[in-house]
Each structure stands twice: as structure tokens, then as C-alpha cells.
Image: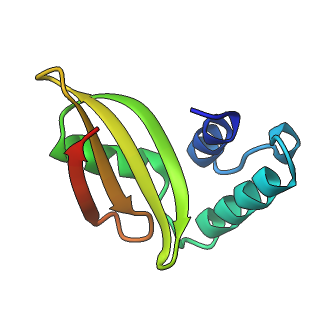
């Protein structure tokens, strides 16, 4: 997980992330876009997303990533399932709809 992903995860948990911790201008722009989308209610808070993902794939969350796609933002949640497999759950960040679940 890159520094930006940790910053985004922490920022989304508390509602905002300190922009000064971002790595470069692109990271700052992405982080700002994510924070603004959360503030406008365009993406779900990470706590809600984790609840949705782990309801579908019970286990321990290893990594969370927020990415911008053509349709908007999506979350990728990597989970160590109880059977020992690492599964990746992709969710629409606005609705929480599961886009895919696959082995990682």
C-alpha cells in the first residue's frame, strides 16, 4: 500500500486527510478530489464500505484502495478470507454496489 492509500484510508475514516502528507502534486490532487467527493456525499465513508465488503467476504481486511474510474470512484478491498485465500472486492464508491469479487 502506498503512502497515499494510507493517507486516503485514514482521511476517509476521520472525514479529511492532511494534504501536507501527500507525496507529490498528483497525490495531493487525488487526495483532495477524494476528500471533496466524501464531503459532497458522492462516495461512501470507508467504514461503510468495509462493512459491505466483509459481509460478502468475511475475513481480515488487508488493504483498501480508492481509485478514480470513468464512471466515478471505486474501492478495492483486499481481504484474507477465513479459508486462507486473498480475495479482492471491488465496489462502486458512490453506491456500495459490489462490482466484482475475485481471487487476488
Q: Residue at x 28, y 66 (%)?
A: 97
Where in the figure is residue 66, as x and y percent of width and height? 53, 53
Q: Where's the N terminus, which quadrant? A: top right
Q: Nearer the viewer, residue 100 or 37?
A: 100
Q: Is residue 23 left or right of residue 96?
A: right
Where in the figure is residue 26, as x and y percent of width and height? 80, 56
Q: Nearer the viewer, residue 12 or 90?
A: 90
Q: Is residue 42 above or below residue 54?
A: below
Q: Is residue 64 left or right of residue 80?
A: right
Q: Residue at x 38, y 51 (%)?
A: 49
Q: Is residue 41 above or below residue 2?
A: below
- Quarter of image, res 32: bottom right
Among all residues in the image, which is located at the extreme left? 83
* Count of numbered badges drawn on the protein: 0
Q: Residue at x 58, y 41 (%)?
A: 9
Where in the figure is residue 5, as x and y percent of width and height? 61, 40
Q: Residue at x 29, y 38 (%)?
A: 104
Amino acid at each position: 500500500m502506498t503512502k497515499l492509500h494510507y493517507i486516503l484510508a485514514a482521511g476517509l475514516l476521520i472525514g479529511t486527510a492532511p494534504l501536507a502528507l501527500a507525496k507529490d502534486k498528483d497525490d495531493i490532487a487525488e487526495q483532495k478530489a477524494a476528500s471533496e467527493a466524501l464531503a459532497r456525499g458522492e462516495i461512501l465513508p470507508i467504514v461503510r464500505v468495509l462493512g459491505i465488503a466483509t459481509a460478502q467476504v468475511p475475513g481480515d481486511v488487508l488493504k483498501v484502495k480508492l481509485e478514480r474510474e470513468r464512471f466515478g470512484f471505486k474501492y478495492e478491498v483486499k481481504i484474507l478470507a477465513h479459508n486462507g485465500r486473498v480475495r479482492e472486492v471491488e465496489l462502486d464508491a458512490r453506491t456500495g454496489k459490489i462490482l466484482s469479487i475475485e481471487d487476488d
